[in-house]
Amino acid sequence: MTASYASPPPTGGQGRRVLIALAAVVFAGLGLLTTWLVWPSTRAGPATFVGSDQTGVEIVQWTDDGTGHLTGSLQAIKATDLANPSGGSFTGTLHDGQLSLVFNTGLGTSYTATGAVTGNQLTLTYQLPEGGVGTDVLHRGTIAEFNQAVADLRGRAASASATAAEQSAAAATQAADATASASASAAQQNARDTVTTDLASLQDAEHQISFTELDQDISQARTDLATTVSDAATARREGRGDPSACSDAGTAQSDAGTVQSDAGTVQSDSSSVQSDIASVGQALADLNRDYTVLQSLGPPVDSTLVASVSSAQTKARASIKSWTATLTTYQPTADRLVTQANAAASAAETAVC
């Protein structure tokens, strides 16, 4: 799916930065989120609005009880602080497109934001802590778009980290050149030892990559889906007149909740594998950096070592690409299983309760 995000607001690009900064203030003391991925709500029909730019990503979701009374949450992730997302819940009202959200900030205090919903656009207005008003514009979106925006944000951060690593390598090269005349032989030996260590570290990191747990997660989700479908079918066979039918339909709903839990496990294990893949990428960057240093010290470079480095670099790049492609298949699979389980359980409940 191609994500579609809000353009920078008409306040000169400060609006979204204001919201993300404000989220950290509003929700201080509520605790940080434990993950940067968002999972679909089991409640039907949530309204979802997403905003993204170079400074961060945010998502606002709510459900409407049908009378304009809202219950929802806001989550925001700053580009400069990916490890510490902020967020929390709110209640509010929506009448004739006019929005009022009240955030519980703890210790009996609250914070109110106002706004408007116009078509697919959500405009939020906040009172800034230092005075004045901040405005942010989000567009109606999906959880998948938010997750993709977070992934893109993380990717840009990784790219910046790679640039820093290259700069570090250049600095190391300059330092090596400055001392080469006095200790060229020792410097070359140290560099060779470092590259040899990097090769071993890269191999160790590659050995950590495993999709076994994710395969088991999907297998368990399929098993739980089969249980959901079976219990739902039992309820439907019993029919509305059977006193056990509604109870069995409730069991199917509980089974569907188990499939949802399985999907949460897929999320957690996917994050672990992603972290392991990132470790391989870092190990490869370390090898590239240190091998560049070794080459800068001049010949001779052991031809056997040269061949080992070239082979390791090629293998690692191909593996990272393959692992990443494989990893992207698990999340959609888990989501489809959740959708199927919810559909079977809901259909049974509608038929017999």
Image (cartoon, rainbow, N blue to C red):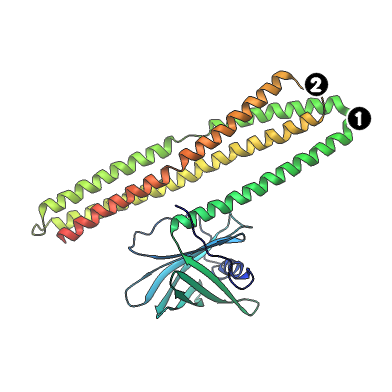
Q: Quadrant of residue 26?
A: bottom right
Can residue 35 be seen?
no
- Residue 54 drawn at (x, y percent): 61, 59
Q: Amino acid at mark 2?
A: Pro
Disc 1 designates what residue? 181
Q: Is residue 160 left or right of residue 238?
A: right
- Residue 269 drawn at (x, y percent): 46, 43
Q: Is residue 312 left or right of residue 194?
A: left
Q: Is residue 112 left or right of residue 229?
A: right
| N-term mark: 1 or 2 | 1
In the rendered view, tell whether residue 347 sits above or below residue 177.
below
Q: Residues within 10 Å of mark 1 (few under 14, many from 20)?
A: few
In the rendered view, tell whether residue 225 sits above or below residue 67.
above
| Residue at (51% x, 64% y) in the render | 87
Identify the secondary structure beneath mark 2.
loop
Identify the secondary structure beneath mark 1.
helix
Q: Residues within 10 Å of mark 2 (few under 14, many from 20)?
A: few
| Residue at (34% x, 48% y) in the render | 336
Residue found farthest to the left:
241
- Label 1 to label 2: alpha-carbon separation: 16 Å
- Residue 224 drawn at (x, y percent): 29, 45
Q: Are marks 1 and 2 in contact (CB under 8 Å)?
A: no
Q: Is residue 162 left or right of residue 87?
A: right
Residue found farthest to the right:
182
The foreground one among 340 and 183 is 340
Q: Amino acid at mark 1?
A: Ser
The foreground one among 197 and 319 is 319
Disc 2 designates what residue? 300
